[in-house]
Amino acid sequence: MIGGTIRRFDSCESTNDEAAKWAKQIHDRAPHGGVIVADSQRAGRGRLGRQWHSPPGSNLYFSVVLRLALPPDKVPPITLCAGLAVCEVVNTRGAVASIKWPNDIYVGKNKLAGVLTEMSTQSQGTVSEGQSSPVESTVIVGIGVNVNGSAFPPELAATSLALECGETIDRAILLGDILSSMHQWVERYCAHGVSALQRAFEGHSMLSGQLVRAKIGGQLRSGKVVSLSDDGALRLRDSAGIEHKIIAGEIECLGEECDE
Ligand code: BTN
């Protein structure tokens, strides 16, 4: 159960680091679904080496340890599971959040939340005396949500749930709601693969049908976003009708509705 065990810190360097340490402990090792939550982070980080603004008393910074019966190449869509959970919960509070594939959550043109998924360890399936042990990937999913913050460095172009909804949000309740939604998305993905996420993703994706540009295999390509592929990559169709897959990296929106 995601959120079955929660460890709380007033402050830490990064909840992803605390979760990775906990996941590797020999005694009292993090269970599947164990959560580290901190009131502030001294070195909160985002994708591509960016910092994550993590002041005390206002937002949510947490990391979930997942022990999944999946090989590493099936792990990336877990980021989408977390993003869908955040969107789903935020949308029940009256704000309209959307996912900028793969890990950014926006309300309008401002960033509300982000997901940083990191592999902790992976024990490969081994074969001993004719018996094979299953593969298990240990994954740390870090989520930062701007909840009650009211001032952000302007270069972040960020917003908070409180600013969007016009009221102070109870962070403990919000955390519980996100964890239970994430539990459901992870279960669905592990049972049925990316097809279990497709519909919800289309409904929440800010890139659907948009013209975007991204680096693919070292080359800049632009095209219209078609949908997700079976491995969670983003499918683009260029002006010649050729499809390309974006597996990772930065996406620049060129479409009119997507000019953040
Ligand atoms: C991004 O948008 O690039 C991802 C941001 C992820 C931030 C969260 S806050 C909790 C966890 N601990 C970290 O150091 N990062 C993630």
Image (tube, rainbow, N blue to C red):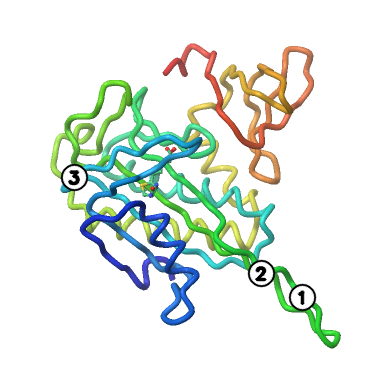
Place of residue 129 in the rendered image (x, y in percent of width and height, measured from the top left): 84, 88
To which quarter of the image does residue 126 belong? bottom right
Confirm if mark 2 falls within 8 A of ligand 1: no
To which quarter of the image does residue 172 belong? bottom left
Place of residue 12 in the rendered image (x, y in percent of width and height, measured from the top left): 29, 55
Work out which residue is located at the far left of the displayed protein and give it: 167
Question: Who's the residue at 64% across and 49% down the image?
Answer: 194
Place of residue 113 in the rendered image (x, y in percent of width and height, measured from the top left): 36, 39
Neighbourhood count class around disc 3 (C-alpha, 10 Å): few under 14, some 14–19, many 20 upward: many
Kind of residue at badge 1: Thr
Kind of residue at badge 3: Ser
Position of 111 with respect to 207 (left or right) is: left
Position of 115 with respect to 186 (left or right) is: left
Confirm if mark 3 falls within 8 A of ligand 1: no
In the image, 251 versus 47, the foreground residue is 47
**Nearer to us: label 2 or label 3:** 2
Place of residue 38 in the rendered image (x, y in percent of width and height, measured from the top left): 27, 56
Verify CB contact (< 8 Å) between mark 1 and mark 3: no
| Number of numbered labels in the structure image | 3
Q: Which residue does the numbered mark 2 point to in the structure image?
A: 123
Task: State ligand 1's quadrant.
Answer: top left
Q: Which residue does the numbered mark 1 point to in the structure image?
A: 126
Q: Would you place residue 136 above or below residue 82 in this image?
A: below
Report the Cα–Cα distance between label 1 and label 3: 46 Å
Q: Secondary structure at mark 1?
A: loop
Report the Cα–Cα distance between label 2 and label 3: 38 Å
To which quarter of the image does residue 190 belong? bottom right
Question: Who's the residue at 14% across and 43% down the image?
Answer: 168
Q: Which residue does the numbered mark 3 point to in the structure image?
A: 58
Q: Would you place residue 246 above or below residue 68 in this image?
A: above
Q: Quadrant of the C terminus?
A: top left
Q: Secondary structure at mark 2?
A: strand
